Amino acid sequence: MSQLAAASAARSSSRLGVAERLRRWLAVPIAFLASCLAVVSATSLPDVLVSVAPLSDVDARFAGWAGVGMLGCLGAASLALLFGPRLGAGPPLSVGAAASVFGLALGRDVVDDLQLSLALVTLGLAVGGLSAGAVCMTLELPRRWRGWVLAGWGLPLVAAWPLVAWLALHDDAGEALRITLEPSVWVLSPVSAVVVLWGVLTMLLEPARVSAAGGMGAWETAWSALLVVASLAALLAMLLGFAPEISLEWLRPLVIVVAGALVVGFGLVSFVVPSTYARTGYVAVTTVAVCLPVCAQLLIVVADAGQTRTTWVAVLVLVAAAALGFAAGWLRPSVGVVAGPLVMAAAAAGGWVMPTTSWPMVAAAGPLMFGAGLAWGAGLRLASTDPMGMRFVAMAAVTGLVFGLVVVAPLGWALGGAVPAEVADVRAAGRVFLGLTFAAAVLAAAATSVSRPRRADAAPTVEPAGAEYTV
């Protein structure tokens, strides 16, 4: 009997070893797919801008439901990141992938207010769960995999926005009202299934994770400040969206003041981040997250409405520019955190004309994408030297991305005088946001040049439970 028990234990150990090796080998593509699914689940800016009036006809309070979706996204992301050492990546990835399937189905061919509100809330949960879950994967993997997983997560979040806008503009939905892209079921189903299965496998294996015994420690103030800013952004969006009776004379300055106060709040959070590495990464990553998706997609919209439509080759050049910048920033983070925002500022100044043809647009947007990728890759690399700092910067990235996508329509209306639904209004809004990007990037370059660590080319060093952390 003892020999049979020993043989059974050996077979079980062998099976567990195969499963664990499979989990590790699939970690990088899963992180990449989860990030891509999160980007697709975010509301499609070209679709929303041209559908503001029809969406208002379906539900006059749809902006308030967008705030609810934002709150759900930030709540799911914060819970997943804060409890990552205890729960791991499996639960948020599984819930996020499942929610994306339902949210994307509800987000197309919208016909009534119930469908619209459910779509916004479900998509918010999907974006938060997928984005945070992919980051939590680094907490339960050996060192050789962590850097690749973090890079696989970060690359789509900085490089995919021109492609998302181009696909939305070139995928004719006819008369259907939608708020997201419509990925093919033959693509969406297997991607979601693979992410869910990887999450389930992780929950069954229960790999070693970063110990949570140390608690929040010095990070308590920083996390509290960031969560307050994130919550206020969502709650104020809900407040303004659920009160359509507010007169336009009061609503316009109120939107400007609220958006400005939240941007100031993002800046003030950096003063309470205890780690120099994380503080520098926070500034670089947040600047890119707030500014890039809006500017890149508006540039694509204006150029595509010109005499000739934007080609897929031009879009791939932009994606490649962001990927190249990301790789350069990852390899030389001490340079990237300063050079990236400076390149973004120069590109924003050059792109202020908002070109109406493809290749002049590429000449303006290409450096913008490269600079954003440079700052994004460098910021993530610096933040990855500390486990809590990495999760904090990831939460800031999700908050910045959602805030930038939600605020574009109301802020464009408040500053430009009209909702940017027509090409001329989109062009005017684009100039406004490029001007704001120039100012934000210059400030970010100044801040990172002062705070950047001089000894910076460190690899991600989040160790499994029981190991020491090194910088």
Image (cartoon, helix red, strand yellow):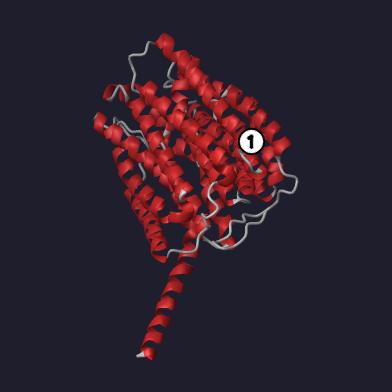
Q: Quadrant location of residue 48?
A: top left
**Viewer-proximal residue among 348 and 131:** 131
Which residue, given by chain and number where applicable, does mark 1 sit on?
Answer: 367
- x then y, percent, for residue 219: 57, 43
Q: Quadrant location of residue 335?
A: top right
**Viewer-proximal residue among 212 and 283:** 212
The quadrant in which the N terminus is found is: bottom left
Q: Is 339 placed above or below 327 here?
A: above
**Viewer-proximal residue among 195 and 462:** 462
- x then y, percent, for residue 371: 64, 38
Question: Which residue in the rendered view is the most extreme toward the top?
Answer: 249
**Viewer-proximal residue among 203 and 168:** 203
| Residue at image coords 52%, 57% | 211
Q: Is 217 placed above or below 255 here?
A: below
Q: Is residue 107 left or right of residue 271?
A: left
Q: Is 132 placed above or below 107 here?
A: below
Q: What amino acid does circle 1 point to? A: Pro
Question: Which residue in the rendered view is the most extreme toward the right?
Answer: 454
- Is residue 181 among what the camera can see? no
- x then y, percent, for residue 10: 43, 82
Q: Is 422 placed above or below 287 here?
A: above
- x then y, percent, for residue 226: 52, 35
- Is residue 22 among what the camera can see? yes
| Residue at image coords 70%, 38% | 451
| Residue at image coords 53%, 61% | 141
